[in-house]
Image: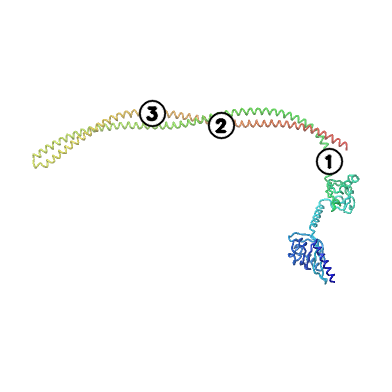
Amino acid sequence: MFGLTQKKSTHTNYLKQAIDTSWAFIEFAPSGVILDANANFLQTLGYSLDEVVGKHHKMFCVREYTSSVDYKQFWNNLAAGQSNSGEFVRTKKTGELVWLQASYTPVFDQDGKVEKIIKVAVEISEMVTTRLESNWMKSAIDTGWAMIEFDPTGLITNANDNFLKIFGYSSLQEISKKHHRIFCDTTLTNSTSYSDFWAELAQGRVKAGEYKRLNKEGQEVWLYANYTPVRDTNNNVVKIIKIASNITDSVQNKENLNAILKTKIHQLSTELAQGSTAMDGKINEMRISVEEASSAITQISMGAQDQSRQVDEISRLLNEIKASSSKTNHKAHNIKTVVEQSTQKAQLGGETIQSVVSSVSEINNGTEDTQKAIDSLAHLSNEITKIVGVLSGVATQTNLLALNAGIEAAKAGDAGNGFAVIAEQTRILAEESKLNSKKIEGVIHSVSEHISGVIASVTKMKGNVQTGEKAALLAKNAFDEIHSSILNTFEQTSQIEIAANFQNESIDNSVQSIEKIVIVSEETAAGSEELASSTTQLNSGIGDISVSSKRMNQIAQELFEVISSINRSN
């Protein structure tokens, strides 16, 4: 018994080693709590053993699933001893989804109770993704394309609803196991090219293009299709997948259009030939007209250029006249300025001479008054001299009287002492009066001499003043004449300046007009040159059109002949 138990243990270890080599393995308690897991499982989900032991299986599932009734029932069934296997989506530690092909197997104890749940799994994420992508692709093809599958010999194995609908079949059973030739006419299927077509597909060559096929009723169906060989792992072609689009309407429209065009082109080619002949005649007429216009425009251009040169010369002469007029205007303005200054100075000189004349007249009047005053002074001096003479006589008489009184007082003795004193004082006064009279007489004599000199000077000054007054009057008359002449010159200069300004403005207007004429002449010349060039180019273009017209006429004739031959052959 012991040996049997040991043998089972050894077998179990081998089995576990085999599982650990290629499979992901994990153990759960009946409640779903994790008991153990191998390295493959931990690596697949991205955890370490310590991170998962003791935690519930729900850590590997999305929350929407773990909170559902199905998830609870899943673990209730396992705890009840029901196994569960299939494809399961789980969540890695990173949150990434992973697909597992797994088997949940309950393990019973000796009493027949579930002791634990063993899960053995393998990752199939890539396979599921490929399958899903294939399903998505097939769904996309089924939505808008017709698809049919054949074996390498051409027998039909599968077809989608779009293909069946295009060819008028109600179910796959109507065409399954039949050959592709049911869609073709006998002329094609009996040809070598049809046999080669399927032989090349069986060898793995892809075919694509437009193909004419027949539906269930024998009506034409045009497809744009791609025949793609599918190989197995041994590189052998195992089936042919055909994906196609119905282009029947387009092909039929093109055929109808070709038929319409064939008839229409025949009609149009006839009209084109006739129109080309008529157009060639019109083009010749246009060429003659354009050549005449080109010649006339060339002459106009030459005349415009000559006019432009003449106008340039006139403009140059007017500019020279304008420059000379500007100089004249400038000189006239300068003369006017000088004349204005001269007028002011002449007026100031006349006023000054008038002032001198007035002053000389006043001096002359003052001289006469002075002479009169001096004459009066001389007369008074004479009168004073006479009075002084009288006073001198009186002083002499008073001195004699005082002398006599002194004598009489001496004779009187003591009684005449007082009188003698008076007589003495009178005598002294008389003597002083006489001395003063002599001094006054000397002064008066000196004054008389000076008055005589002043009279002579005043007389001479009076003559000079009268002469100066005459000269000042002559100078005033001369300044009056100068002022009148300067005023006349000023008026003439103003007229010259006004005339020069008018001449300058007239020349400016003429220059501006000439400049406009120059611009117009240059534009006319340039326009004539451009027009001449354009007519030359037009003439050349008409020549090209004529050549093209002749060629078009030739082509129309050739087209007419070709279409006529086609119609005859049909």
| Of callouts 1 and 3, the N-terminal one | 1
Determine which of the numbered discs, if any, sits on residue 508 in the image: 2
Q: Residues within 10 Å of mark 3 (few under 14, many from 20)?
A: some
Q: CA distance from mark 2 to mark 1?
A: 77 Å
Instruction: Identify the residue at image location x=42%, y=28%.
Output: 482
Numbered disc 3: secondary structure: helix
User: Residue 32 lies in what quarter of the image?
Assistant: bottom right
- Asked whether the residues under the numbered discs 2 and 1 touch, taking CB atoms below 8 Å apart as contact, a structural biologist would say no
Q: Within the image, what quadrant is residue 397 found in?
A: top left
The location of residue 462, given as percent across then percent down, is: 31, 29
Residue 420 in percent (x, y) is at 11, 40
The residue pinned by badge 3 equals 475
Q: Is residue 164 visible?
A: no
Q: Nearer the viewer, residue 488 or 504?
A: 504
Apparent side of residue 280 relative to residue 154 in the rendered image (left or right)? left
Between discs 2 and 1, the one toward the N terminus: 1
The residue to which callout 1 is attached is: 258
Residue at disc 1, secondary structure: helix
The answer to the question of whether label 2 and label 3 lie on touching residues, with beta carbons closer than 8 A, is no
Identified by mark 1, the residue type is Asn
Looking at the image, is 221 positioned above or below residue 296? below
Q: Could you say where residue 20 lies in the image, as x and y percent from the top left?
A: 80, 63
Q: Position of residue 53 (x, y in %)?
A: 75, 66
Q: Say which amino acid is labelled 2.
A: Asp
Above-or-below relation of 317 to 181: above
Q: Is residue 462 left or right of residue 324?
A: left
Report the amino acid beneath label 3: Ala
Instruction: Measure the C-alpha gap from mark 1 to mark 3.
Output: 125 Å
